[in-house]
Amino acid sequence: MNICIVAGARPNFVKVAPIIRAVERVRQTRPDVGYTLVYAGKADDPSLEASLFDDLQIQPPSVYLNVDSASLNEITGRVMGEFEQYLLHHPTDVVIVVDDLASTMAAAIVTKKQGIRLAHLVAGTRSFDIRMPKEINRLVIDGLSDLLFTAGDGASNIASREGANLSKIYKVGNILMDSLRFNHNRWTRPDCMEQLGLNDRQYIVFTLNRKALIADKANLQAMVQTMVDQAGDVPIVAPLRGMAAQVVGEINQQLPQRGITIIQPLGYLDFGYLTAHALGVVTDSGNVAEEATFNSVPCITLNSYTEHIETVSVGSNVLVGEDPQLLGEHIARMVAHEWKNCGIPDRWDGRAAERIVQILIG
């Protein structure tokens, strides 16, 4: 069996790494099972730090589609063209796509046009906001997929309500937890913590990536101001890149007091340590919120919804939207150690990849 695993962006590698390791274990007794890791981007993509694949303990992709564009429609068209050529020249039994990117949707469409079995990893997630490009991607990918691998009951129920045959839906668990459990004892304390004098459980981590948040500079400034005010003597450290680093840096200059400490983006193991040992996390990333729930670290998400509601209903996450006042209230609770009780959601047991591979090979 030839399995093709498609990654569209850096976060996808964290989710497919456990599957690759599971396939390699199966190959010890089933040498007929193999995989190819395909990346939609370029080998010199700056978001892929040199240590990433060593940190994840997997080999780098063997195929790069070399698609690089800011336009979602252009990405879709170019990935479709490049991936079609790959499938035409490489016999493939099943393609695994991850999450909800434009490149993910493009690979899914091409797979089905070639008559190849399609599996969607992290299926059934919805914002229920059709104005979001990713929501359209999710609907298309789930609609095309032969196998829907969901993280929990909520996602499985969504896929079922939207018409997916129950025989297609598999609640395998949260694949991100496989990576977290595998690497939990491998986190490395980043050098920046010594340089900044950060002690465990005495700092807040802030991450920012969502374009809409960055574009509304006035509201972002209000949120940064309230974070700094309510944090008091607790330092806020932010591993940021690109426009996010630029805009937050400009906001810092306008603050009358100490602002947010911006640092260079960290490698996977360093970032894992930084967030796992924080007093709390403020983020607009669903993956970071999931990691915080796993680590039982208080987390504030700068969004009004989450695709993984279990991080809120069971875990350590709260949603504040883009409301500076609500953000400030939760920062105050975080600093005062008055956070809600939280736990680990069902099937966050680190065995999702094992279940997925067994389903694929029958």
Image: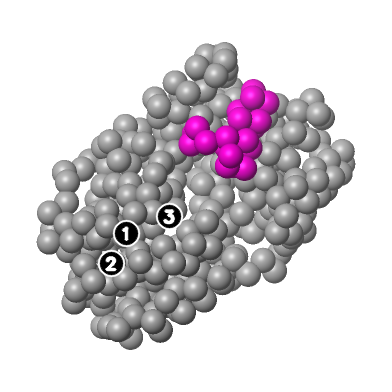
Where residue 9 appears, as percent x and y from the top left, is 61, 54
Where residue 221 appears, as percent x and y from the top left, is 39, 69
Q: Are marks 2 and 3 in contact (CB under 8 Å)?
A: no
Q: Which mark is drawn over residue 284?
A: 3
Above or below, 47 against 261 in this view is above
Quarter the N terminus occupies: top right
The earlier-in-sequence mark between 3 and 1 is: 3
Identity of the amino acid at label 1?
Answer: Pro
Decide if residue 45 is in sight here. Answer: yes
Q: Are marks 2 and 1 in contact (CB under 8 Å)?
A: yes
Identity of the amino acid at label 2?
Answer: Thr
- Residue range in magenta is 125-146
Magenta segment includes 217:
no
Q: Give the mark toward the camera: 3 or 1.
A: 1
Where residue 262 appears, as percent x and y from the top left, is 41, 77
Identity of the amino acid at label 3?
Answer: Asp
Using the numbered discs, state the Cα–Cα distance from disc 2 to disc 1 in whole angstroms: 6 Å
**Could you tell me which residue is drawn at 58 percent across and 39 percent down?**
131
- Secondary element under disc 3, as helix, strand or loop, is loop
Q: Which mark is drawn over residue 226?
A: 2
**Could you tell me which residue is drawn at 82 percent across and 30 percent down?**
114
**Could you tell me which residue is drawn at 61 percent across and 30 percent down?**
139
The earlier-in-sequence mark between 2 and 1 is: 2
Q: Give the mark toward the camera: 2 or 3.
A: 2
Q: Which mark is drawn over residue 324?
A: 1
Residue 361 sits in which quadrant?
top right
- Secondary element under disc 2, as helix, strand or loop, is helix
Answer with left or right where residue 233 lies relative to residue 144: left
Report the number of discs.
3
